[in-house]
Structure formats: structure tokens, C-alpha cells
């Protein structure tokens, strides 16, 4: 299915721990907007602390969508995400509700901004076979296989990006065509001015300190017990949920393979790496407004400044096209 780009909306992106959620609450309350999550892990129920989901009070104050959609032992593809998002957007447009997308999953953001052609349905048996092949021979061997089938796609995928490499190989095997010939998503599209795309630009050392502090707070809030409860209720986590940073480290902790300080340190390191990947993706986006951020960070003042900037520059209100 071909999903068109989303227009007439706000997009608040950025790396993990950059303050998106707090600013989003302030923005949404002033715009009268609903928030739609762009977090690939927040779709899973019971995964609350580790995905930093909005609090019950925040969700009562502002309507949030695309949270707690499926059980953590299920898989939830980008196609399922986009299908649900477009249904939600259509509903909000009919109610003339402003929309604010918030999250840190770059793949979701790019698909929403530029559109997405999902190609053939996922073949989980094939993906499992390719996963085993990568475990046995290494990610580079899998990437080399792709380079022989689809050099263009391989040139755009990092040799260690196993998930995207597997998807490209799956596309070729299911269609007989290279994924580069079938992809229409992520192409450069003219910016029609109806969207506002924002991310916060923190000094790297400050962002890393925020990440470290946030991870320590999550462990204090009961993250280990959350994962223990998940494993008690489910035999295993789904392919996507199992990749969430921190959850795999805590599972190793619960198996007695590492101690608590090591679990915390590894989770902090993994989260910093995640933030780095998010920033790399974000820097590839045109029309992204980078907002400088540093301590002390005032989410309400930041939201007010964004609204003031919009008024001064004549930015559109990001309302439904039907309400124009």
C-alpha cells in the first residue's frame, strides 16, 4: 500500500532525552492539538518505564494516540503503524483537531513526511532464516549478498544495519526486483509550508548527561520489575519489542548474567548510541528547524517561543486543509 505524506501538522522530533514530551504537552495545550506518537516502542502495552510513555496525568490532559496498541509479544510493522496513523489523522481532520506528532523514531518520521510504499507483506519465516544467517556469518556477509542483488540499496544501508538489509533482501526474494526500483518513499518532495518540523539541538556532553540521568531514574522507578512482569506474562517479546534498549540488558540481569551496575552502564551506552543514530537520520532531513537547547531547559518557555516564531514568520496554523 502506498501511504501519502502527512501535511498540515506539527512534528516535534529529536533524540531521546531531548525534552520533546515536555514541550509537546505545552504546545498541545496551547494549540488545542492531539498528540500522535512517533515512537516504535511506545506502541507496546506494559512497556511503560523504558519507553518513557506520557504519565497518566499527561494523557488525561491531552489526548494521545498510537500508544499501547499491541501486546509486547506481537510484531507491529511500519505499515501497520502508518495504516493506524492515517485512520487517526482522518478522524481528527473530521473533528477539525490540530495534530502534533511527537517522537524519536526517524523511520516513522520520514515515512510520515515523505510518504511510504510498503512493498510486499513481511515474510517472518524468511526474515528468521536471514537472521540466523547473519548470526552465523555476520552482518557484513548479509550486506555483501545485498550488494550483489541491489548495489544501489546496499550503498544506502550501513553494513551493520541488519534490519534494513534483511528487508531489502526480502523485497528482492518476494518480488524479483531490487527494492531501490520499487521504493517511492523518502524521495525529496517540495515543502509546501503546511508543516512545522522541529528538533532540539543540545551540546553533546549535556545530552549524554541527560541520558545517563534519565536511565538511572528509570531504574529507580522500577524498570527491572516492569521487565520481570513482562516476562512472567509473556513467554517472549516480539522481534521489535525485544530490540528496545534497556529491556535486553535487564533480561540479562534477571538471568544472572550481569549485575545491576553493569545493566545500567550498558543501557546508558546503548541509549547514547541510539541518540547518535537518531541525530544522523534527522540531519538528513530538509526543512528541519533546529532549536538550540541547554540547561536550564524551560519547556513552557520553549513552546511559547515556537509559537511566537510561527506568528512572526507567518507560519501556517497547521490546521486541517478542510478548515482553510
Image (tube, rainbow, N blue to C red):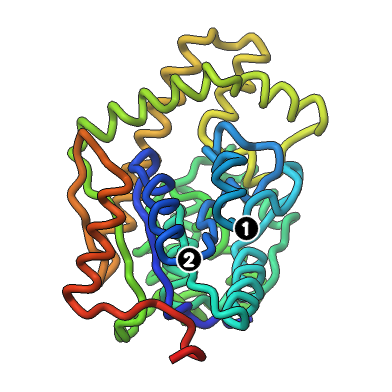
- Tell me which corner region of the image, top left, top right, bottom left or bottom right, holds residue 265: top left
Report whether 129 appears left or right of 313: right
Q: Is residue 208 visible?
A: yes
Residue 88 position, x and y percent, is 63, 71
Q: Quadrant of the N terminus?
A: bottom right
For image coordinates 81% across by 33% down, the residue present is: 234
Residue 138: give x, y in percent of width and height: 50, 41
Contact, CB < 8 Å: mark 2 with mark 1? no
Q: Is residue 319 left or right of residue 79?
A: left
Q: Quadrant of residue 298?
A: top left
Position of the C terminus by quadrant: bottom left
Q: Nearer the viewer, mark 2 or mark 1?
A: 2
- What residue is shown at x 30% (from left), y 61% (from top)? 198
Residue 104 visible in the picture: no
Total marks drawn?
2
Q: Nearer the viewer, residue 37 or 277?
A: 37
Identify the mark at residue 66; answer none if there is no mark.
1
Residue 52, labelled with which disc?
none
Classed neighbour count for the residue bearing mark 1: other residues with Cα under 10 Å, few (<14), some (14–19), many (≥20): some
Residue 32's label in the rendered image is 2
Could you say whether the residue bearing mark 1 is in a helix, strand or loop?
loop
Q: Earlier in the sequence, mark 2 or mark 1?
A: 2
Depth check, front residue: 128 or 110: 110
Q: Residue at x 28, y 26 (%)?
A: 209
Q: Residues within 10 Å of mark 2 (few under 14, many from 20)?
A: some
> Residue 11 placed where, x, y %?
39, 64
Vertical order, 244 against 198 (above or below): above
Q: Quadrant of residue 124?
A: bottom right
Q: CA distance from mark 2 to mark 1?
A: 18 Å
Is 262 above or below relative to 207? above
Secondary structure at badge 2 equals loop
The image position of residue 149, as x and y in percent, is 49, 69
Amino acid at each position: 500500500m502506498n501511504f501519502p505524506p502527512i501535511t498540515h501538522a506539527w512534528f516535534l522530533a529529536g533524540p531521546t532525552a531531548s525534552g520533546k514530551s515536555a514541550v509537546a504537552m505545552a504546545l498541545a495545550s496551547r494549540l488545542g492539538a492531539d498528540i500522535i506518537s512517533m515512537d516504535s516502542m511506545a506502541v507496546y502495552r506494559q512497556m511503560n518505564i523504558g519507553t518513557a510513555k506520557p504519565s497518566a496525568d499527561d494523557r488525561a490532559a491531552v489526548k494521545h494516540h498510537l500508544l499501547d496498541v499491541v501486546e509486547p509479544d506481537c510484531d507491529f510493522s511500519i505499515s501497520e503503524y502508518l495504516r493506524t496513523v492515517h485512520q487517526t489523522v482522518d478522524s481528527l481532520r473530521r473533528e477539525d483537531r490540530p495534530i502534533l506528532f511527537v517522537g524519536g523514531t526517524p523511520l516513522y518520521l520520514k515515512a510520515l513526511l515523505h510518504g511510504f510504499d510498503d512493498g510486499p507483506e513481511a515474510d517472518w519465516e524468511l526474515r528468521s532464516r536471514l537472521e540466523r544467517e547473519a548470526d552465523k556469518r555476520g552482518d557484513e556477509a548479509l550486506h555483501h549478498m545485498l550488494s550483489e542483488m541491489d548495489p544501489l540499496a546496499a550503498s544506502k544501508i550501513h553494513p551493520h544495519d541488519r534490519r534494513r538489509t534483511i528487508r531489502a533482501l526480502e523485497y528482492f526474494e518476494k518480488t524479483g526486483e531490487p527494492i531501490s526500483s520499487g521504493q517511492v518513499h523518502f524521495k525529496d518532495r517540495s515543502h509546501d509550508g503546511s508543516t512545522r518540523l522541529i528538533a532540539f539541538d543540545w551540546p553533546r556532553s549535556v545530552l549524554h548527561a541527560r541520558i545517563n540521568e534519565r536511565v538511572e531514574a528509570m531504574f529507580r522507578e522500577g524498570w527491572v520489575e516492569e521487565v520481570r512482569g513482562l516476562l512472567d506474562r509473556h513467554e517472549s517479546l516480539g522481534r521489535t519489542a525485544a530490540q528496545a534498549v534497556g529491556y535486553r540488558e535487564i533480561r540479562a540481569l534477571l538471568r544472572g548474567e550481569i549485575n545491576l551496575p553493569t545493566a545500567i552502564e550498558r543501557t546508558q551506552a546503548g541509549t547514547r548510541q541510539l541518540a547518535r543514530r537518531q541525530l544522523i537520520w534527522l540531519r538528513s532531513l530538509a526543512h528541519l528547524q533546529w532549536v538550540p537547547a541547554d540547561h536550564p531547559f524551560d519547556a513552557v518557555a520553549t513552546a511559547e517561543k515556537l509559537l511566537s516564531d510561527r506568528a512572526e514568520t507567518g507560519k501556517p496554523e497547521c490546521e486541517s486543509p478542510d478548515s482553510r
